[in-house]
Amino acid sequence: MENPPEKYVKKYGRANLIGQSVLYATDNPLTALAEMRPEAGQLITISKWKLATDYDLTVNSIFKNSPRKNRVSNSMTMRAQLEYSNLVSKIDYPKGLLDQIDLLIHFICDYFSKEVNDANHFDYFLSAHYANQIFTVLQDGEIDAIFYPSVRQSLELTNIAMKATVFKNNYTLESVEESKLVRFHNNGWQLEGTGDSKKFEDNNIIWF
């Protein structure tokens, strides 16, 4: 996961503006590895967090784009597609309006699913803009997190971008384990445990 202080955010991200701190995370270590693209021999630290309050997280899903491999599905986008279809079936939209809504949603999803040039953070400009609208304008700023498919995983698995304050106020660190990346190529990754479970206190990892 990644959540740098605002003063260090000098570039646009998939879901953040310059100067805007957003927590990026995933529930799948393979997705994290694909996103971070570490090199063989590097140490990998996997932390697990749990909800420590009764806070009811409000989530927006980026769901219109399907995985790029025909026989693979993304459970998050499938559930969101079904929920969306069920919702719009109950509303009598004026002629043509639903088509316009679908086009707009597709447009936004396309930018969240866009391949980017790592050397040009402006490739993230539009997705960062729409993420900010989702976080600050949509439903009067009540949305706490955005689920979106991982571009690095061909849209098959899911990332989450969450408001940093929501995460800080409602989640607590449960475990921290360290592994060494011993294989890294097109066929996948292999993690070798170092036997080191990091100590932590007050949600801070004690590295030394």
Image (cartoon, rainbow, N blue to C red):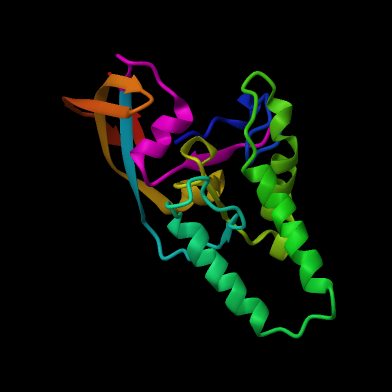
Q: Position of residue 9 (x, y in %)?
A: 64, 27
Q: Is residue 194 visible?
A: yes
Residue drawn at x 53%, y 71% as measured from the top left = 82
Note whether 77 is above or below 149 in the view shown. below
Q: Nearer the viewer, residue 2 or 198?
A: 2
Note whether 138 is above or below 42 in the view shown. below
Q: Position of residue 136 (x, y in %)?
A: 71, 53
Quadrant that contains the C terminus: top left
Q: Nearer the viewer, residue 9 or 82?
A: 82
Bounds of the magenta segment:
18-43
Residue at the far top: name it: 41
Quadrant that contains the N terminus: top left
In the picture, measured across the screen, residue 115 lies left or right of residue 93, that is left
In the picture, measured across the screen, residue 87 lies left or right of residue 159, that is right
Note whether 182 is above or below 157 in the view shown. above
Q: Is residue 202 visible?
A: no
